């Protein structure tokens, strides 16, 4: 299994707290495994307020690491945008009526 390193960063890109190393099959699995430990580490060091994102690095050969995923923390600023908000749908038109009328006979 590949080895991943999760690092909490602030707005300036500086690491906060210690990095957490895990072995997982995907970056998402690494996040699930390491996130509770990383949160404890960061909030224990007193840097939880200015935390904006988590970076996931994959360790390769010769001690190289490659950034594979970045995701925002819950406490970070999302800018207050409306991403994912849809306009309300218009109501469906009423179904056609099945009303039938008989034709009037011709008048004499």
Image: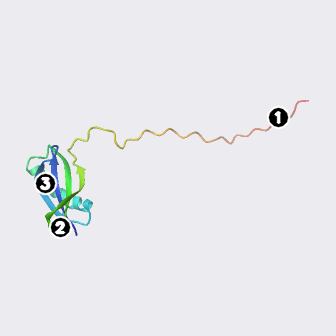
Residue picked out by circle 2: 61
Instruction: Tell me the element at label 2.
Output: helix
> Residue, x 22% and y 41% (percent of image)?
77
Instruction: Tell me the element at label 1.
Output: loop
The numbered mark, 1 or 3, whose residue comes first in the sequence reads: 3
Please rate how many residues cluster around mark 3, counting C-alpha atoms within 10 Å: few if below 14, some from 14 to 19, many from 20.
few
Instruction: Tell me the element at label 3.
Output: helix
**Image quadrant for the N terminus?**
bottom left
Judged from this view, the residue extending furthest toward the left is 45
Pick whichever, 1 or 102, lies toward us: 1
CA gap between label 1 and label 3 equals: 84 Å
The numbered mark, 2 or 1, whose residue comes first in the sequence reads: 2
Q: Where is residue 2 in the image (x, y as percent from the top left)?
A: 21, 67
Residue picked out by circle 3: 40
The label number, if any, that marks residue 104 in the structure image: 1
Quadrant for residue 64, please give it. Answer: bottom left
Pick whichever, 55 or 61, lies toward us: 61
Q: Where is residue 50 in the image (x, y as percent from the top left)?
A: 14, 43
Count of picture labels: 3
CA gap between label 2 and label 1 equals: 91 Å
Residue 53, compared with residue 61, is above or below; it is above
Which mark's residue is nearer the viewer, 3 or 2? 2
> Residue, x 12% and y 50% (percent of image)?
15
Residue 98, compared with residue 4, is above or below; it is above
**Image quadrant for the C terminus?**
top right
């Amino acid at each position: 299994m590949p080895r991943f390193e999760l690092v909490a960063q602030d707005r300036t890109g500086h690491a906060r707290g210690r990095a957490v190393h895990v072995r997982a099959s995907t970056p998402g699995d690494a996040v699930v495994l390491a996130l509770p430990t990383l949160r404890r580490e960061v909030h224990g060091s007193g840097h939880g307020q200015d935390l904006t994102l988590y970076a996931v690095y994959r360790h390769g050969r010769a001690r190289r690491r490659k950034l594979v995923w970045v995701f925002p923390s819950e406490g970070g600023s999302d800018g207050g945008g409306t991403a994912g908000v849809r306009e309300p749908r218009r109501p469906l038109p009423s179904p056609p009526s099945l009303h039938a009328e008989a034709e009037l006979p011709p008048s004499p």
